[in-house]
Image (cartoon, rainbow, N blue to C red):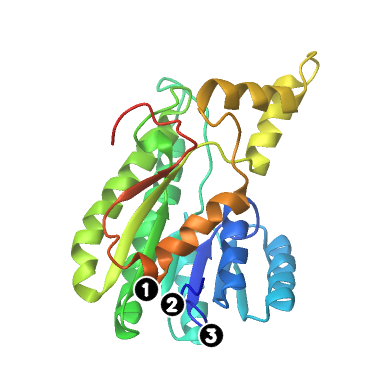
Amino acid sequence: MDLGLKDKVALVTGGSVGIGLAVAEAFAREGVHLALCARDEARLRSVGARIADEHGVEVLTVGADVSRAEDVGRFCDAVEARFGGVDVLVNNAGTGSAETFMDASDTKWQHYWDLHVMAAIRLARRLQPGMTARGGGAIIHNASICATQPLYYEPVYNVTKAALAMASKCMAHEFIAHGIRVNTINLGLVLTPDWVETAKTLTEGTPTTWEEHLEAIARDSAPIGRFASPEEVAHFFVFLASPLASYCVGSSYYVDGGWLRVVN
């Protein structure tokens, strides 16, 4: 199926590993040129070169921490100098947390606010005029099922992802007048390196393997009974960015294997 994205430009934050990398590769397979950022610049350069070589697209890589306003500005400067703007923005950078309200410091709250909420706002605010001039486009926020159905060991993550979902809804109402569709994807269990690392830590020195630990989580949480692969969920990002999703505006889409327990 031709998704109508060939030679468009997509910006993906957190594009060197996990979901962000899978989304970048899925776009590249459609002939989309890429602007990728991540904190690990060496790894990012390596994956960027591989994607460009395998798919014949242009790939700009910039080492940046999008929780920092100055890094967002520097990244956008590079993107505009290389491509003149973007057609698709995927706000993907983020990470889980583990804390109680009593032990989470102001510094931690502020960092997650800047990473999950302000990064998306700053990027959208900076790139919207150029996107409008190019005839519109799509902005996709990678939030989480935890924006609606929280995991109670990570209140900072839950709260900031819920705020991102609300920011996305408000942004959608404002930006559609400029031909820019804004939507949120709320993912469930996706087998990223973070999940594997956590599982290995939790099972070290126990009779349970990290694979068994994750299988139990999937069995207990998702009716589908397994984790998704990053590549599996990446397809939905690409579709939602494409003209085939032209009537999708201001919505939150759950890609969660049936984990959400309520009608939404």
**Element type at marker 1?**
helix
State the residue in front, 236 or 15: 236
Front label number (3 vs 2): 2
State the residue in front, 59 or 116: 59
Q: For mark 1, what is the residue? A: 127
- Number of other residues with Cα within 10 Å of mark 1, as a class: few under 14, some 14 to 19, many 20 or more: some
Q: For mark 2, what is the residue? A: 86
* Distance of label 1 from label 3 (alpha carbons): 14 Å
Does residue 106 show up? no
| Residue type beneath disc 2 | Val
Does residue 87 show up? yes
Front label number (1 vs 2): 2
Figure check: 35 above or below 58: above
Q: Residue at x 33, y 48 (%)?
A: 252
Figure check: 226 above or below 80: above
* Distance of label 3 from label 2 (alpha carbons): 10 Å
Please tell me in which quadrant of the rendered image residue 149 appears. top left
Q: For mark 3, what is the residue? A: 82
CB atoms at circles 1 and 2 under 8 Å apart?
yes
Figure check: 37 above or below 201: below
Q: Position of residue 38 (x, y in %)?
A: 60, 60
Q: Which of marks 1 and 3 is nearer the N terminus?
A: 3
Left or right: 244 as drawn, with respect to 204: left
